[in-house]
Image (spheres, rainbow, N blue to C red):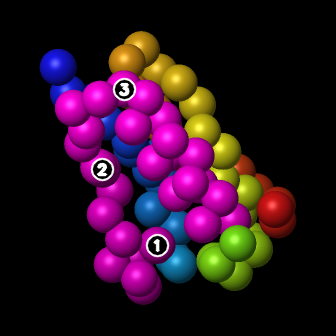
Amino acid sequence: MEYHVVVEKMCGCAKRNNMPQIKTFDDKENALMVARAWAQQLNESFCGKHEFNVISVDDNYVISVGEGSF
């Protein structure tokens, strides 16, 4: 089974950095670990106009994009 980490909305920083919107994994625990690390990296390295969080949706993880800074 495949597990996906999906960025909900590609903000300007993500587009400028040619960031992928979806990453696929064979292991659910690995997908969660990557999703959390990815969201943290986005919060620390992007402009601060958005806050990134991980939400579990079925067997996948969505990196949500909200207004405000980390």
Q: Residue 35 vs residue 52: left or right?
A: left
| Residue depth check, mark 2 versus mark 3: number of the one nearer the observer | 3
**Residue lying farthest to the top in this orientation:** 58
Residue at left 52%, top 67%?
A: 11
Image quadrant assignment for residue 50: bottom right
The residue indicated by pointer 1 is: 14
> Would you say the magenta stretch is mainly helix, strand or loop?
helix
Give 29 or 38, whichever is nearer the viewer.
29
Neighbour tally class for label 3: few under 14, some 14-19, many 20 plus, Cα within 10 Å: some
The residue indicated by pointer 2 is: 22
Neighbour tally class for label 1: few under 14, some 14-19, many 20 plus, Cα within 10 Å: some
**Residue lying farthest to the right in this orientation:** 69
Secondary element type, mark 2? strand
N-terminal label among 3 and 1: 1
Q: Could you say where residue 40 lies in the image, as x and y percent from the top left?
A: 65, 59
Identity, as a three-letter code, of the amino acid under mark 2 = Ile
> In this orientation, does residue 64 appear?
no
Residue at left 46%, top 73%?
A: 14
Q: Is residue 41 above or below residue 67?
A: below
Which quadrant: the N terminus?
Answer: top left
Q: Residue 52 vs residue 60: left or right?
A: right
N-terminal label among 2 and 3: 2
Secondary element type, mark 1? helix
What span is colored magenta in the figure?
A: 14-43
Identity, as a three-letter code, of the amino acid under mark 1 = Ala
The residue indicated by pointer 3 is: 28
Label number found at residue 68 = none
